[in-house]
Amino acid sequence: MTDPLSLPFDLPVFSPGHVWLVGAGPGDPGLLTLLALHALRSADVVVYDALVSPAIVKLARDGAILEHAGKRGGKPSPSQPDISRRLVALAQEGKRVLRLKGGDPFVFGRGAEEAELLAENKVPFRVVPGITAGVGGLAYAGIPATARDANSAIAFVTGHDSDGAVPDTLDWPALARSVPVLVVYMALTHLEEITRRLIAAGRRPDEPAALLSKATTPAQTVITAPLAEIANLARGVEPPAMLVVGDVVTYRDRLDWLGEKN
């Protein structure tokens, strides 16, 4: 049933009736962890998100059932409660269930909601962290998340709440004052409003900013501009996209190791 990796150490057994919540990383299949690959080669059922690269899904073992459970704004998609209940049902059938999520399942991935329902139903589960786009995506754009001469703190923020609106629960003035680098996930839909709020809260209009689309994939696009102008340059940019604000963006001029100048 399994295709074990040849390693000088043992990986945990993926047992029947268990669910593994696995981060697939930001897109590049090479950024998968060993545990993620082990899960793909062991699972009976792979329930995967829309943001998971097809090349990663193809790594599932022969005979595994592949179930798409992508959630994309504005498009027909299964509800989160339906997805969570499906994981429980599959595990109760004795399947090895791999819930494959883009990035990290516990970073804006709603993995906690799925884990809670599994726990409530006494379904054994394991969480396998993945490289989140706010770190891996920046690295592929030549932008360090932290640099000694630029910042000693960074904040990861979501660009919309569960209702799809810009989060009103965020303390925008506090973010503007206290965090030198901001990474805003899912920023594209409300990009103009987000930049307006940041500037109104005290960020400099000329502060370096970058918009990263489809990070770490062959379709990666990076746009850099002052914060006040970045929204005007976003036409034609496709999701998923992140906004990065802070002086670390200027490192891209020297550290763009992919050689891409978008």
Image (cartoon, rainbow, N blue to C red):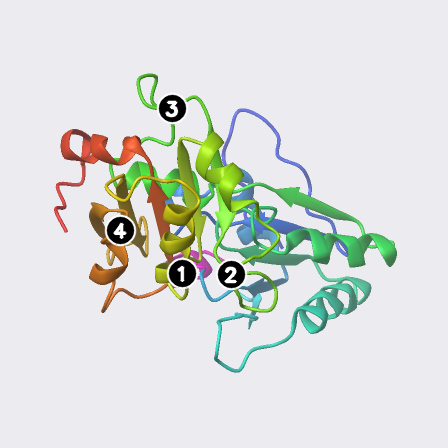
> Which amino acid, mark 4?
Ala
* Name of the residue lying farthest toward the bottom: 76
Q: Which residue in the structure is indicated by mark 3? A: 151
User: Element under label 1?
Assistant: helix
Question: Distance of mark 2 from mark 4, alpha carbons?
Answer: 18 Å
User: Element under label 3?
Assistant: loop
Q: Is residue 111 left or right of residue 190?
A: right
Q: Which residue in the structure is indicated by mark 2? A: 166
> Which amino acid, mark 3?
Asn
Give 198 or 36, whichever is nearer the viewer: 198
Are dots 2 and 4 in contact, CB under 8 Å? no
Mark linked to residue 228:
4
Q: Which residue in the structure is indicated by mark 1? A: 193
Predominant secondary structure in magenta?
loop
Are dots 2 and 1 in contact, CB under 8 Å? yes
Image spot of residue 230 (x, y percent) = 25, 54
The image quadrant where one finds the N terminus is bottom right
User: Element under label 4?
Assistant: loop
Q: Which residues are magenta?
A: 52-61
Mark 3 or mark 4, earlier in chain: 3
User: Which mark is in front, 2 or 4?
Assistant: 4
Mark 4 or mark 1, earlier in chain: 1
User: Which mark is in front, 2 or 3?
Assistant: 2
Question: Distance of mark 2 from mark 1, alpha carbons?
Answer: 8 Å
Question: Distance of mark 4 from mark 1, alpha carbons?
Answer: 11 Å
Question: Distance of mark 3 from mark 1, alpha carbons?
Answer: 25 Å
Residue sitting at x 35%, y 44%: 244
Estimate how packed mark 1 is, as few (under 14), some (14 to 19) or many (20 or more) residues with alpha carbons within 10 Å. Answer: some
